[in-house]
Structures are given as structure tokens and as C-alpha cells.
Amino acid sequence: MKDLSIIAYCSIKDNTIKLNNTTRVAKDPKLSFLEFAKKAYKEQVLDYPKFFKMDNLSKLAFLASDVLCNSDIIKNEHKEHMAIVLSNRSSSLDTDRKYQATIIDPKNYYPSPALFVYTLPNITIGEISIRHKIKGENAFFVLNKFNAEILTQYAISLIENKKSNLVLCGWVDYDEKKYNAFMYIVARNGIYKHSKEFINKIFNSN
Amino acid sequence: MDELKKELKRNIISQLNLEDIDVSDINDHDALFGDGLGLDSIDALELIVMLEKDYGIKLSDPSEGKNIFTSIELLSRYISKNRTK
């Protein structure tokens, strides 16, 4: 089988969004993530008010995936069966804490439904899938650190077993104001090498 | 009643994270769900929590919400009649 390759990659950190290592959005690093996300949305998205109802982790994943999936690189008809394999370290802990705050005091016990729905990290995949009408396989791994080996092997397996022709892979982590997103799309005919070494290199350099 | 309506609009905007919508954008008779403000089922649950938390009203039957949450006008009338705080 022909080696797989990477069509495009995107990173978000330090209030900067890059697509294929080219800056798409750059904002004052002193802005909070919420302030940055709002500005990035206004520049890159604009047509999806549900964005503002998402938790921070989903906002982060949504922005990264939107930059990739709305670029001219992927045709809409190919998105439907795209698989999504994401990972992070902090799971949904940031939102879990906020939800916990709504239930910790028995005298002020008002569980928030809007927070509860985001107390799982794979909700990020749901948000991306709804946005782009993606119905492919998906998985979310909670790992100690970014692991290119797992993502690489999983993407190869999905494509070799004809589960999908495209796989959106990556790392999307948010906890207590620290965040980092890195996503890339694997396919049969891309530009960049689909290897553990190359993925680690672009993950560390972005 | 007018102050309650304003308060409800402010709370709905902030608690449901309605971006770029101002109190003056919501008319008292606008539909809150569907074609109006476009609220969804999770928003409905948040409104039920808001009723209990802010006004001491506990809906024993969540399906009651369908009528109560039709518009700000109906919601404010229901709260005025049933509030315990």
C-alpha cells in the first residue's frame, strides 16, 4: 500500500492560529483564551452562534478543525466519511471543575445542564462532526503527553481497513487557562510525510 | 413587570451565552425557541434551573416549560404569579 501522507496541519497556542506553519490569526498573548477565541471566531468563522455555548475545550477544537476543514484542501463530499482521532492530557477537567462548583454546596445545588453536557472530552468530536456533517469513525484518547505513535497507527489502521479515506488527527488540551491544539489530516495523497518523526517535529515547532 | 422583563432578558442573554444580542433586540412577544431566539433543548433545561435558582419556582412537570417559555411576556407573567423569592 502506498504510504499515507498529511494534507494539512493547524496549530493554536499563545493566541495564534497557524495553518501549515503560516500564521492565520495572531492576537495579543495577554488576552484570555475566551477573548482570543471570540476574536478568532469573528475573523475565521462568523456563521455558527452555537460556538459561544461551547466550553473552552470544544471552542479550541472547533477553531482548529474549522481552519482545516474550511480550507480549500478538503472537498465537502469527502468530509462525510472522515474519521476523527483526537487526544489530550487534561480530558474535560476544566469543565468538570466548573460543573462541580454548581453541585458542591447542598444549600446551593443547581446542576448546570449546559456545563454537564461538556463533561466528556469526546464531546469536542461531536461538535466538529455536527459542524461539518461528519459521520465517520472516531476516538478520543486521554494520554500523559502527545503520542504521535498512537495517532499514526490508528490513522493507518482506519485507512488500510477502508473505514475512511481521511482522518483528522490531533491533540487538543485545555486546563486552567493553558491550552494547546494541534490537528492534521491524513490521506493517501498529501503534501507532508505521515511519519511519527515528522508529526513530532511539527507538533514541537508549532 | 417591565423591570422583571428586562431582568429576564439580561439573565437569558448572559446565562445562555447569546452572543451579539442585546436586551433591546428581544421583544416581549418574540418566540424564545424555534425561529425566535433559536434556543435549544439544553437552553430549556438551563431556564428551568434559572426559575428555581432565581425565583424559587420548581417545575414539577418539565413539559410545563413548553408553555411557560413561549415568550418573555408569558414567562414574566408566570414568574410574577408563582415566585417564592
Image: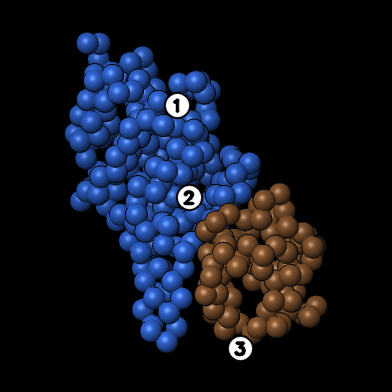
As drawn, is A164 to the left or to the right of A109? left
As drawn, is A36 to the left or to the right of B72? left
Look at the image and give the colour of chain A: blue
Look at the image and give the colour of chain B: brown
Secondary element type, mark 3:
loop
Q: Which residue is mark 3?
A: B84
In the picture, the disc for residue A49 is none
Quadrant where the N terminus of chain A is found in the figure: top left
Q: Position of residue A19 (x, y in %)?
A: 46, 32
Q: Position of residue A153 (x, y in %)?
A: 20, 29
Which corner quadrant of the image does residue A199 belong to? top left
Residue ID at (43%, 71%): A111
Nearer-the-camera pick, B82 or A119: B82
Residue ID at (46%, 56%): A55
Q: Amino acid at mark 1?
A: Glu
Q: Which residue is mark 1?
A: A80
Q: In 3D space, how far apart are the residues under numbered discs 2 and 3 (Cα atoms)?
A: 37 Å
Which corner quadrant of the image does residue A119 belong to? bottom left
Q: Nearer the viewer, mark 2 or mark 3?
A: 3
Nearer-the-camera pick, A45 or A50: A50
Q: Amino acid at mark 2?
A: Lys
Relative to A83, residue A174 above or below:
below
Which class describes the residues within 10 Å of circle 3: few (<14), some (14-19), or many (20+)?
few
Q: Which residue is mark 2?
A: A59
Tell me if I can see residue A73 in this picture: no
